[in-house]
Amino acid sequence: MPTRIKAIRIHALRGVRDLSLELNGKSLVLKGDNGTGKSSIVDALEFFFTGRVAHLQGAQGLSNEKYLPHVNFAMKDLAVELRFDPGNILLKRTFKDISRIPDVLKEYFEEGRRGTFILRRAQILEFINSQPSDRYRSLGNIIGIGDLDESELQLKRVCDELQGRVESIGSECETILQEISEMLKGKIASIDDVLSRLNSMLKQKGLPTISSLTEMNDYAKKLLPKIRATVSEKDLASITAIQSLLGDMLVPEELVQTAKDLNPKINQFISSRSKPLVDDHNLLEMAKDVIAERGSDLCPVCEQPINRNEVLKSLSERIKVLMELTTDASNLRTSVASLRSNFERHVSRLKDLYDKLEQIGKISVHAKDVKNLIDKGNWLSEQISLAGQLNNQVPVDDLLAWRNDVDRISRTLQSECKQLLNDIEPTEEEESIIEAVSLVGGVRAKLDQLEKNQRDSKVSNSSLKLAQTIYSAFSDAKKQITYKVYSEIQTEIKNTYIAIHPSERIGSMELTVEQKRRASLRLNLELFGKKGDPRALSSEGHLDSLGLCIFLAFIKRFSSNFGFMVLDDVVTSIDSRHRLDIAKLIIEESRDKQIIITTHDEVWFKQLRACQEASGLGGNFVNEEIINWDIYTGPQLRRTRTEWEEIEEYINEGDKSAAGNKARQYLERVLKEACSNIQAKVQYKEDGRYEVGDFFDPAKQTLQSMARGTLLEEEIVTVFNDLSRTRFMSNVLSHDNELQGELSIVEVRSFCNAVHKLDQVLSCPTCHSRLIYDKQSRVLRCSSEKCKDPIRVNTS
Amino acid sequence: MNIRDEIFEAFTKELREKGVSDDAIWRLLSVLKVNEVSVDEVIAMIKEVSQNAYKD
């Protein structure tokens, strides 16, 4: 026996304060006006299975923690409980955890965990409005891989960031070599050139030379003892080390200029996110503005109800993702990453300076200022990082002020270090030693930076290579599998689409992932001999149903074992004729699935109920209406009943007229369907106003003739005999007839029971689908292809 | 198998073909399969595994 949800209980979630739904394993059709809590119930199911509600998370500061709990409750109060059959297993999900999943439900949960069983109106809308490159992503949302697009984008950002770092390190290495060249007054092309050039300068001053680069570290220790002891050797070493650091402290004007140059590009990007859509789709942009400005929950074009916030959010996110994937954005991110990396090296030098300053009492007073500059530098680094996400500009004024402060404190310290050294009143020889120690210390500091950069460069290069491999593998895998899946399900999509649009000549239908582009899906539909983008060929209603067909095909392909599906207000823009076909299709799906359908559409709700009855599947459904909602009580439900349940209730209340009237309508529907299904000959009426009498005899004669000598014969004869005796009551009870008073409630019940019996006799005992006459095989059989034990009566 | 699993399986296969080690792939998948991972986290992970990312 497949797993089915027996009951749902929701507490303190969005618009629901407390709600209990008893399903007993049946499907649910839920009707309610917009804003009455239908989607809250869907959100609760998504939360229960996945632990989050995707559309309330991520973009624009949305978070489940903030928006999922009911406004009058805290996060800890929120709870969703589902009871499952078989086994009557109760499971509860809160923000903190979920009950232990028993082994028997593990597979079911594994399927549900991905949340692909829900189709929402917003997803369909996004699909309808998509351009090819965007449609790939909108379909990704329908089939539950939307977040993989975000992962792909993150991997692209990782590549850009690492590319920026590699470029920045390369440029920094060149700058350092240039600076060492200036210090040593000669061209230094690599570290190998340093020692010979440095020794040549030391020789000129008559000072000891250095045999290896590591010996440079001890040079100060070796020479400083030769200076008279008016200042401690340790201080002298620190002062010369600080001087070396200060020589490299100034932030180049180019860094600020780079930030200034980047800002207009970032700004252009921020302000023109919707540009490509504007170029190709002016109408879309206008609609977006109108929806945003109006504050109305009606679509400005078709005046159908929409969820305004979801539509706007969906549009903004779509545009954002699209734009961020462009090459311009990628280049811009690389440039900002390079700027950030370069800037952080200056902050790092300030940190080195801070450590040295604390060691010298006379100038340690400046340590606090340097600390402030480090803190401000860290803040600026974060701002530059945010600019790299193309959300804001680099704060150039703050950067300039910081640079000036660094410049100021650097000059002050240089002057004070010079003064400290002057205080010694060095001899010419001592001055030469101090200069040489400072030079060797300065070059050593530069070499340390260079070596560190070369190590960083090696790591960054190998990281970049790996990141690029990962990104291309991920992107290719996603494209390749999506393409494969689309190819596999095209026939299924087409068949489902034809079932909804039976009278339209659909030539071919193909979903193609274009190989030239990173992630582009072209959807071609051939209709009335023309082939092209469905947006050009079909109405919004057609695209609406196409999105639904794709979802159903994916469910069949990937969630065939799950057996649960949620359709949240998905047929808003479809006309009533096609809505009926969709209703038939979905009710058919309910044979092997538990489905929850929400709608605000009264007509579609009625069609769904009529299809349940017509297919004999009324018993598989619970139909509920939300009759009221407020923030304190949440949605208040009223169960809508089947025709037979209504009749039974009228009988129990003793309302003969209402029971008779309803039974007459019931009989008319059952007979009409019977005549159609068994191909009984009914006399044509020009005005189309058929009554019970027009169908009764043709149905009776045809059925009795077909059932003769079969197992059905006795039942059919009996039920028509009962009806022949009692159906006069339908006329008496439905009109203002004086005989009404003469009829007892027991007599009325006998008529109603006969009608209900006919309904049962004309349905398959296994799956309750209607019996139809198969002319070719000359059998009366169950109409369902999915019936596990279909009835089959040979009429020949 | 669902479409996500199929994608991750194809991704793993492609990385293996490019010589990426199983350990690096495992570390990568454990990061990528988590929702809302930041760029810095991915970079940190890549830096950590990049030295020994490829099979000998």
Image (cartoon, grey):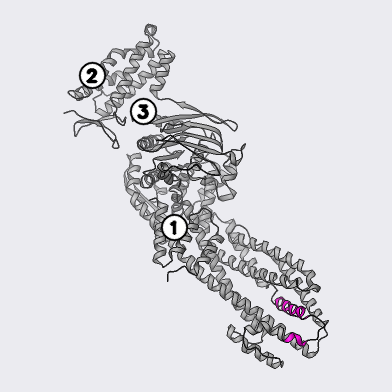
- A355 left or right of A128 in image: right
Residue labelled with disc 3: A613
Task: Check the picture and name the quadrant holding the C terminus of chain A.
Answer: top left
Q: Distance between the residues labelled 2 and 1?
A: 65 Å
Q: Which mark is residue A24?
A: none
Q: Distance between the residues labelled 1 and 3?
A: 45 Å
Residue labelled with disc 2: A717
Q: Residue at x 66, y 78 (%)?
A: A445
Region of the chain picked out in magenta, as a range: A223-248
- Which chain contains the residue that carries disc 2? A
- A79 left or right of A786 in image: right
Position of A563 relative to B33 (above/below): above
Instruction: Say whether disc 1 or disc 3 marks the residue closer to the N-terminus.
Output: 1
Membership of A240 in magenta stretch: yes
Residue extending farthest to the left is A796
- Which chain contains the residue that carries disc 1? A
